Amino acid sequence: FKQIFKTVSGFIFIYTGLLLFLSGANVGFLSVGRTVGLGFASSELGRGLIFLFMIIVGFIIAFAEPSIKILAHQIEEISEGAIKAKKLLVIFGAGISLALVITFLRILYQIDIVYFTN
């Protein structure tokens, strides 16, 4: 009974904390993020900065994600060095960057995602 009580009370604390955090983020940050995003997206310089930021973030994700590094090294081992891990990381980074840029264009020009699924 004691373990069940600890589990249920822990679940209630986690649920309450998550609910409060997400509500605060929704109220506090969503409007500010929308305002800043609209300000950036309304100018050509801002759009260029967003594109540059997304490209940089794509490469950071590829080089920082441990599972992608492990996969790249495994591919290098299996191919006996014919495919280099660093080249794979650059290709992964370019792919992630491209996906982020396409997502931004989809949002910027209000393209419905249904066009991409058919």
Image (cartoon, rainbow, N blue to C red):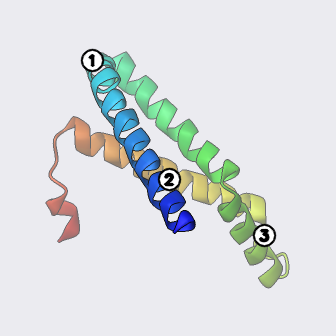
Quadrant (top left, top right, bottom left, bottom right) of the C terminus: bottom left
> Observer-nearest residue: 102 or 36?
36
Alpha carbon distance from label 3 to label 2: 40 Å
Where residue 42 sits: x, y (%)? 25, 19
Location of residue 11 with respect to 79 vertically, above or below: above
Where residue 9 sits: x, y (%)? 46, 53
**Residue identifier under label 3:** 73
**Residue identifier under label 2:** 10
Alpha carbon distance from label 2 to label 1: 37 Å
Residue 62 falls left or right of residue 1 = right
State the SS at label 3: helix
Q: Quadrant of residue 46?
A: top left
Q: Earlier in the sequence, mark 3 or mark 1?
A: 1
Location of residue 30 with respect to 56 vertically, above or below: above
**Residue identifier under label 1:** 35
Q: Is residue 79 something one can see in this rendering? A: no
Amino acid at dot 2: Gly
Location of residue 37 with respect to 113 vertically, above or below: above
Amino acid at dot 1: Thr
State the SS at label 2: helix
